[in-house]
Image: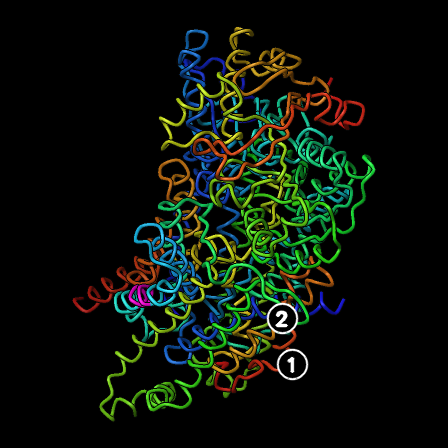
């Protein structure tokens, strides 16, 4: 599944990235800090998801198992051990990597709809596990009262401090993803996305590359899940539900899949919309459904993809004139 | 114990009847259009609501609803296909999955605004009330009817596709649309018709479900994800596969629920993961189906 | 600067803000959605629209049963709207996620929606700012199970929604049945959101119990009840419904429920005072009478405002001091007080039977009150409560 294009090639100065960073620094003063932190967490989740959908062409409909699963693991480590918070985050990431390896071995040979379906099915099994191990997960009450801990000695109880700590991690993680995308590894992924047969005939071990992309994507999603539970003080079953998998698809598509920053914009847009809708109208599904339908029909490249596409077109025209 | 087990098998056949009708519609749509219709559960829900509203405002009885509701919902499906889905056929099939996901959100919430979340009751038609003695056990008459009605519809659909010239054209269009077009057949109209027919099947299942479950906006959500699993287990696009798998999965899940209730919601996905591991194209799928 | 020190700032505001955080468009919106907002506003209007000379403003948020959203909205209500009361919280997960915030930011929270006993009986959560108002699983289970067992329903078969709320209900039900000389023949833990209960009903039927107990809620209960009728089980046994609201009965029609026994926390058709409220409510809300959960909202807001008035301030600590231990009698609550040990509202609960349609005198008048269960008997005794706030 391809759309958008890679607006940020490695040579050019990354204006959009800089603009986003400035906006990110100002965000908790423009918005309510808890909402701002949610945006950072979900944006990172969407960036991780996009590594798979946008750059490898695989639609996972079960990414909630990594995001939600890691949120539970991180939360349980925070509640039951004395490990420092970053170590708890890493435990969640390690869980996601292990799970992604198992799921990947099962599913990576399948394509398209099949891949979407099998990831969905396995995610449902993880959801089931959360409902069964109630002693650990808290069942439908959720895993509650998780402490935030400290971030390298810095207490996090203040919401803005919490925000900036997560912004730092998210910026590093996004920079890492961007680096992966532009690495030779990322180029191979794109080649697979464009034409798998061709990549195979060129001698690439396609399944291996896909598996690696799947694991990387899951690791970033798991990191985001761990960040969610620490920031919110809790996690609930919704976070491993298939609707959460659907939400991250929406965010990515809205912002522009296959663009580095599109998912960030998409996540922000989606969360701001949800936040406002909760107060303004009594029909969240109608509004979000409609926006989704229009996006798929009219703006398939997403917000960032469309803007970049138009800029590129203008630049191309300008180039001809010069 | 034996009587109890027999009852469980019948219960499995009832839920299997719904899986079969829904996955059959999905399979037909997937076979020709190559899209996974996420809104299939919504069509099922709309089918039940048409029956309910028909009864409330027009006094339509169950038997009329069983015919009228699929027609109404088929028209809704045809409008959606002509208006929205047909614009995306040239693109990756995943876009239509996402589009139908959006349609689902929209319609479900709109129905909630109109009818409320809790839903409404639909009474069992008078002639099918009560219980029937099957010789070895007593079972609600209506449920026996559901099994029989579903079997008739599924077999009729299968015969239509496998044994008639219309079906032959359909199968040909599935495999080689260009060739069929060359014979002067209007392929887009065929596609629209098939989509409408798939939606009608879902609506038929919805009307049958109305007296068993409460008619509620989210009733489609509860069944669509398991139905996807049935389709994958059977093999995407396989007509016979989806019917047989529907009933088999229904019985297996019911037996699982009997011995260990908490697993009933998840057994279907475990089955699916297992089948994909052993035979990635599904039980009845061809290699082509996995693409 | 928003942060954990909001109350002083809020108290200095020129209005008193009450935030309703509830499910306005999700699965519980029929029993406690916008109707609860209407009830809150009626409480404000009945109080005169002003307290301590300041106007009272109501804001409301739709959490759609998403605990993440409820958490964010609770924070927003406190930091942005400067709310000094958080009320409603339909479903336990949203209640607990809001409770974390109330505890951290020292804002009064009154849970009327969620029924989990973790809210006030789990030391991880309970805190001086969170009150549980209306009912909890203990009261529901004991009210129904103890009475039915005493009256001859010795053999029980339970069908339990397999999640924390259902399990807590089942545990308390089993305890109540056994304490009264009954026995539980079977207990099936069924996944939440099950729409086909036929497998479990057949098992239950084969066990030949006197009573089938439904330890679930909302649509699960509705579907189970519909199928109990379909299988004709009500002829041979009784049904104990652990949690039932007027809206559930309304959705399916009273005949489906007729004869089943349930414990409720209040009822609009109880006396002249409650009927007067209900009739005013119906005029403002599509002609619907209030469910007892919506009714609890009205009382909670009214009692909060009274406490603010007595305290002479909307400061959380001052208001809590006025609420705790206070005796409450209003249209909804009878013989009530807030128990200092755990902030649980102890009040009369009612054992009710659902009437058949032929005996329902007007729409929504679905219950016949069998007996009043005094608060001390209805709720978990203080000696068994795990929280010790005071």
Which stretch appears magenta?
Answer: B71-77
Chain identifier of the residue bearing label 2 in the image: B
> Picture coordinates of residue C253 (x, y %)?
48, 43
Query: How dense is the environment of label 2, judged by Cα within 10 Å: few (below 14), some, or many (20 and up)?
Result: few
Tag 2's secondary structure? Answer: loop
Q: Residue at x 29, y 71 (%)?
A: B86
Who is closer to the viewer here, B184 or A148? B184
Cβ–Cβ below 8 Å for labels 1 and 2?
Answer: no
The dominant secondary structure in magenta is helix
Work out which quarter of the rendered image holds the C terminus of chain A and state it. bottom left
Measuring from the top left, give residue B92's x and y in whole percent: 38, 73
Q: Can the viewer see residue C101 in this picture?
A: yes
Q: Look at the picture and state if C134 lies above or below A230.
A: above
Is C275 magenta? The answer is no
Is disc 1 in the same subunit as disc 2?
yes
Is B52 above or below relative to A117? above
Residue closest to the eye, B250 or C338: B250
In the picture, residue A75 is in which quadrant? top right
Q: Is residue B281 above or below residue B52?
A: below
The quarter in which the N terminus of chain A is drawn is bottom left
Q: Secondary structure at mark 1?
A: helix
Does the rendering let one see residue A220?
no
Chain under numbered label 1: B
Identify the disc placed on residue B243: none
Residue A98: percent from the left, percent from the top? 68, 64
The residue singled out by tag 1 in the image is: B278
Coloured how? rainbow
Find residue B134 and name its label.
Answer: 2
Which circle's residue, 1 or 2, is located before the other in the chain?
2
């Amino acid at each position: 599944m391809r759309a958008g294009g890679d607006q940020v090639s490695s040579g050019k100065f990354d204006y959009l990235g800089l603009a986003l960073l400035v906006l990110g620094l100002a965000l908790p003063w423009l918005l309510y800090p808890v909402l701002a932190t949610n945006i950072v967490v979900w944006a990172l989740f969407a960036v991780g998801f996009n590594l798979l959908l946008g750059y490898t062409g695989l639609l996972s409909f079960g990414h909630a198992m990594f995001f939600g699963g890691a949120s539970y693991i991180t939360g349980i480590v925070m509640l039951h051990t004395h490990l420092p918070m970053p170590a708890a985050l890493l435990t969640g990431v390690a869980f996601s990597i292990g799970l992604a390896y198992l799921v990947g071995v099962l599913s990576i040979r399948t394509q398209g709809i099949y891949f979407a379906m099998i990831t969905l099915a396995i995610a449902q099994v993880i959801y089931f596990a959360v409902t069964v191990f109630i002693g650990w997960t808290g069942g439908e009450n959720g895993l509650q009262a998780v402490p935030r801990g400290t971030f390298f000695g810095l207490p996090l109880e203040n919401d803005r401090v919490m925000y900036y700590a997560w912004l730092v991690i998210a910026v590093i993680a996004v920079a890492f993803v961007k680096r992966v995308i532009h690495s030779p590894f990322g180029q191979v992924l794109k080649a697979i996305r464009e034409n798998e047969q061709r990549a195979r005939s060129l001698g690439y071990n396609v399944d291996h590359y896909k598996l690696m992309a799947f694991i990387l994507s899951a690791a970033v999603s798991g990191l985001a899940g761990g960040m969610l539970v620490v920031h919110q003080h809790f996690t609930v079953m919704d976070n491993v539900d298939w609707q959460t998998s659907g939400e991250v698809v929406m965010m990515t598509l809205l912002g522009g899949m296959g663009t580095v920053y599109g998912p960030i914009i998409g996540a922000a847009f989606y969360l701001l919309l949800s936040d406002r809708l909760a107060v303004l109208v009594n029909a969240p599904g109608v509004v979000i459904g409609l926006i989704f339908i229009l996006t798929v029909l009219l703006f398939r490249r997403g917000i960032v993809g469309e803007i970049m596409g138009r800029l590129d077109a203008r630049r191309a025209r300008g180039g001809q004139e010069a | 114990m034996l009587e109890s087990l027999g009852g469980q098998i019948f219960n499995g056949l009832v839920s299997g009847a719904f899986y079969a009708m829904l996955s059959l519609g999905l399979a037909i749509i997937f076979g020709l259009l190559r899209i996974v219709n996420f809104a299939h559960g919504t069509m099922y829900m709309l089918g039940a609501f048409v029956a309910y509203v028909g009864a409330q405002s027009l006094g339509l009885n169950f038997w009329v609803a069983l015919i009228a509701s699929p027609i109404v919902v088929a028209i809704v499906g045809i409008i959606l296909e002509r208006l929205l889905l047909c614009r995306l056929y040239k693109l990756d099939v995943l876009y239509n999955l996402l589009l139908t996901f959006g349609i689902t959100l929209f319609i479900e919430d709109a129905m909630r605004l109109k009818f409320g979340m809790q839903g409404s009751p639909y009474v069992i038609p008078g002639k099918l009330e009560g219980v029937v003695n099957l010789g070895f056990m007593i079972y609600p008459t209506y449920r026996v009817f559901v099994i029989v009605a579903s079997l008739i519809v599924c077999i009729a659909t299968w015969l239509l596709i496998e044994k008639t010239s219309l079906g032959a054209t359909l199968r040909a269009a599935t495999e080689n649309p260009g060739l069929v077009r060359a014979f002067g057949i209007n392929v887009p109209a065929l596609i629209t018709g098939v989509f409408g027919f798939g939606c009608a099947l879902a609506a038929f299942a919805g009307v049958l479900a109305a007296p068993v479950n409460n008619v509620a906006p989210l009733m489609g959500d509860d069944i669509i994800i398991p139905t996807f699993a049935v389709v994958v287990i059977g093999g995407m696009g396989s007509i016979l596969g989806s019917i047989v798998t529907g009933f088999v999965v229904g019985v297996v899940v019911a037996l699982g629920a009997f011995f260990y209730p908490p697993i009933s919601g998840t057994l279907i996905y475990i089955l699916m993961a297992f089948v994909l591991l052993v035979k990635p194209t599904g039980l009845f799928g061809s290699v082509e189906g996995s693409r | 600067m928003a942060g954990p020190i909001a109350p002083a700032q809020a108290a200095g505001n020129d209005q008193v803000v009450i935030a309703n955080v509830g499910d306005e468009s999700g699965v519980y919106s029929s029993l406690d959605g916008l109707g609860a907002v209407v009830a809150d506003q009626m409480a404000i209007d009945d109080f005169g629209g002003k307290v301590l000379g300041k106007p009272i403003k109501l804001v409301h948020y739709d959490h759609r049963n998403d605990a993440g959203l409820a958490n964010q909205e609770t924070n927003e209500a406190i930091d942005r709207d400067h709310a000094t009361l958080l009320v409603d919280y339909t479903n336990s997960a949203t209640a607990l996620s809001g409770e974390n915030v109330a505890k951290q930011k020292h804002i009064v929270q009154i849970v009327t929606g969620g029924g989990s006993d973790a809210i006030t009986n789990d030391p991880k959560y309970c805190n001086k700012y969170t009150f549980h108002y209306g009912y909890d699983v203990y009261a529901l289970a004991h009210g129904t199970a103890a009475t039915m067992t005493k009256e001859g329903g010795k053999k029980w078969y339970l069908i339990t929604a397999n999640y924390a709320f259902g399990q807590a209900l089942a545990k308390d039900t089993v305890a109540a049945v056994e304490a009264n000389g009954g026995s539980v023949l079977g207990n099936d833990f069924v996944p939440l959101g099950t729409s086909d209960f036929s497998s479990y009903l057949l098992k239950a039927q084969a066990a030949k119990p006197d009573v089938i107990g439904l330890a679930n809620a909302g649509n699960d209960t509705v579907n189970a009840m519909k199928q109990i009728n379909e299988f004709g089980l009500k002829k041979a046994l009784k049904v104990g419904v652990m949690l039932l609201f007027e809206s559930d009965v309304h959705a399916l029609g009273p005949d489906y429920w007729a004869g089943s026994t349930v414990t409720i926390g209040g009822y609009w058709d109880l006396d002249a005072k409650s009927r007067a409220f209900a009739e005013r409510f119906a005029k403002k809300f599509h002609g619907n009478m209030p469910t007892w959960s919506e009714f609890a909202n009205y009382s909670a807001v009214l009692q909060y405002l009274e406490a603010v008035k007595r305290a002479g301030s909307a400061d959380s600590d001052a208001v809590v001091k006025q609420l705790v231990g206070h005796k409450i009698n209003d249209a909804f609550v009878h013989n009530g007080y807030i128990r200092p040990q755990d902030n649980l509202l102890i009040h009369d609960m009612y054992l009710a039977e659902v009437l058949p349609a032929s005996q329902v005198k007007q729409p929504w008048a679905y219950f016949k009150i069998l007996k009043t269960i005094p608060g001390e008997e209805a709720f978990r005794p203080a000696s068994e409560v795990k929280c010790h706030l005071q």
